[in-house]
Image: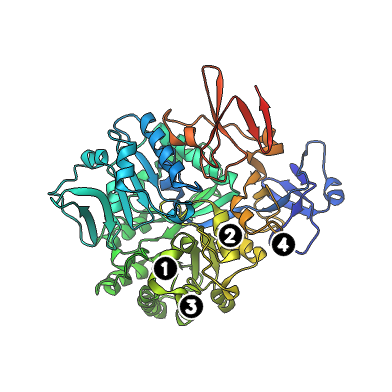
Amino acid sequence: MTVDIIYYNGKFKGYGTFDKNITAAAISKGRFLKFGTDTEILAIKNNSTQLIDLNNRIIIPGLNDSHIHLIRGGLSFNMELRWDGVKSLGLALSMLKEQALKTPPPQWVRVVGGWTEFQFKERRMPTLEEINAVSKDTPVFILHLYDCALLNKAALRAIGYDKNTKESPGTKIARDAEGNPTGMLIADPNAIILYSTLAMGPKLSVVDQKNSSLHFMRELNRLGVTSVCDAGGGFQRFPDDYEVIEQLASENKLTVRIAYNLFTQRPNHELEDFQLWTKTTEYQQGNEFLHHNGAGEMLVFSAADFEDFIKPRPDLSNEMEQQLEPVIRLLAENRWPFRLHATYNESITRALSVYEKINKEIPLEGLNWFFDHAETITEHSLERVKRLGGGIAMQNRMAFQGEYFVERYGKTAALQSPPIKKALEIGIPIGMGTDATRVSSYNPWLCLYWLTTGKTVGGLKIYSDDNILSREKALELYTRGSAWFSKEQEKKGSFLENQFADFAVLSKDYFKISEEEIKDLYSVMTVVSGRVVHASDEFLSLNPSLPPVSPDWSPIKYNGTYGGNKDTIQYSITNHNYLFNHSYCGQTTNNFKILGCMCWAF
C-alpha cells in the first residue's frame, strides 16, 4: 500500500499508545497505516511519501466533543464578541465599547455564552448602567449562561419591548417602578425568553455564514478538536439551517467531522416532526465528515428540564410520559438513536420508566441512545441506564455554574454532580464535551481541566479525589469515549491501525504541565484524515489558507477568538500598518509580528 504521509519525531499518547514508545505514524488514504519508532516507520516510505517532523512534540488523538452546537454556532460565530477567557470585567467592557463603535446598524453587539463572572478578577457581572454607558445607539445583547440576558436601551428599542410586553410562562422581564423593562430578561426557569429574544436580531448573509462557519471550525481545530456530535438546538431548524454546512461539505471544506442530531422545534407537534424525518432522512446518511446521528437533544418539550442552578429545579409536566412514549417508540421502531437533555435525576427517572416500557416491546440495546448532562443522576438511575444499554454525554457546565450549584444545593451534593467515576465503574459509555456555545466555552481544555482538577473556571474546587480523573482517562473520554456516541468507536478516537488519521500536536506536554497550564493548551498542528487543517508556531508554513473574516466589522477580526489564543495572532492591514490583536487579553500591538515568544519589528 502506498504511504502518503509519515509524521515522525513525536510522542504519540492516546488510547492504543499510552504504554508504548511510539514516535511515528504512517498514513495511507486518510487512515493510520502503521505506528512505530522513527526507524521502523521511515523504513516503509516510498518516493512519493511526504515527511513531516513533529519536533518532539506530544501528539494526541483529535478531540471529539460529544455535545456542542457547531452548526448553529458557526452561523453566528463571526458576529459574536467572545468574552471566553477574558480575565477582567474592565477589559470585557472596553472590548464591548470598541465593538459598538465598529458595528453598523441594524446589527447588534452580542456576547453569547462562554463566560462566567467568576473568571473576572472583579468576580461580578456587568451592570445595566455599565452596558448602557458603552453604547447608546448600537443594540447590545449579553447572554449569561441560561439564566439571564442583559440588553441596553438601544436593544430594547430594536425589539420593541416596553411596559405592555407580556412574559411567557416561566420567564420574567425585570421592570422599573413605572413598569418599563430595565433591560434584564430572566429565565424563571424557562430560557425561551433568552434565545427567542436573541433570534430577533439580524442574521449574517449566507456568504458571511459560510465564512463564519469556516472560521469557527478553524478555531476548534486550533484547540485540537477534529470531531463533534452536534446536538441541534433551539431555533436550529432542519433542513433550512443546515444548508450552509451542507454546502461546505459538498465543497469538501469541512475540517471537523460532524455527526448531527435532529432537534424538534414545535411544542406539541414533536411526534409529527419525527414521523416526517424518519420517512425522509436515513439514519447515518451522509459521509465521514457530515452525517445524521439520530434524534434529540429535544425529543419533546415537556421532557426538557432547565439547567439554571440559580433557580430551583423545575418540575416536569404531568403530560411528559404520554408525549415522550410515542416518540421513543417511533425512534426505536426505525432504529434511530436518540439523546435527551436531562439535568436532574428526577427527570431522568421519569424518562427511564418510559424507556423501560418501550424496551419490553422493542429492545433498545445497540441503539447507542443516551442522556445529555445528567448532573444529579443517582447510582440507581445509572444502573437502569446500564441495563438498557445507554450512555451519558457529560459536559463541563459545572465548571461554569459550580458556584451557583454549591450555593443552592451545598458542597456535599456537588461532590458527585455529575458522578463521572461511578458511571465509569458501572460500565456506562461516557463521552465528554462542552455544550458550547451559549453556556460553556467551546474550549475543550477547560473541560479537561475540570475533569482532572475538580475545579471550576473560577478556581472553586467542587470535587474530591473520588470524582477526579487522571489526565490519561480524561483524554480517553474526550477521544475514544465520545466516538461511541456516533457509533464510530471503531473508526476514530484512538491510535490504532485503520482508524481515521485525526490528531493534534500540543503546545505543551499535557501529561506533565501544572494544573493551571492545562487551560491554556492549544494545538500547534491539527491533522484530519492525514491532512493538516491548522498549523502555528514552528509549523506555521503548513497552515492552510483561510478567507479573511467577514463581514468587515466582525468582532473576531478585531478581538480574536478564545482567550487562550496566544500564538496565532489575528491581524488586518490598514494603510500599510500592521495591526495585531492579541486574542488572549484583548491587547493590541502595533507594528509587531508576534509568534510564540518571538517578535520582529517591521
Q: Which of the 4 image quadrants contains residue 421?
A: bottom right
Judging by the rendered image, the residue that carries numbered circle 4 is 16
Above or below residue 398? Residue 436 is above
Relative horizontal placement of residue 147, taking residue 117 as reference (left or right): left
What's under tag 2, amino acid-wise? Leu
First along the sequence among labels 1 and 3: 3
Badge number at residue 382: 3
Q: Which residue is mark 2?
A: 448
In the rendered structure, are the residues bearing label 4 and label 3 in contact, judged by CB atoms less than 8 Å apart?
no
**Residue 493 in the image, given as x and y percentages of width and height:** 63, 58
Image position of 482 (left or right of 39): left
Judged by depth in the image, the label closer to the viewer, 2 or 3, is 2
Tell me, for residue 313, which label it has, or none.
none
| Dot 1 and dot 3 residues touching (CB under 8 Å) | no
For badge 4, the amino acid type reads Gly
- Of 44 and 162, the residue lying toward us: 162
Q: Which residue is mark 1?
A: 405
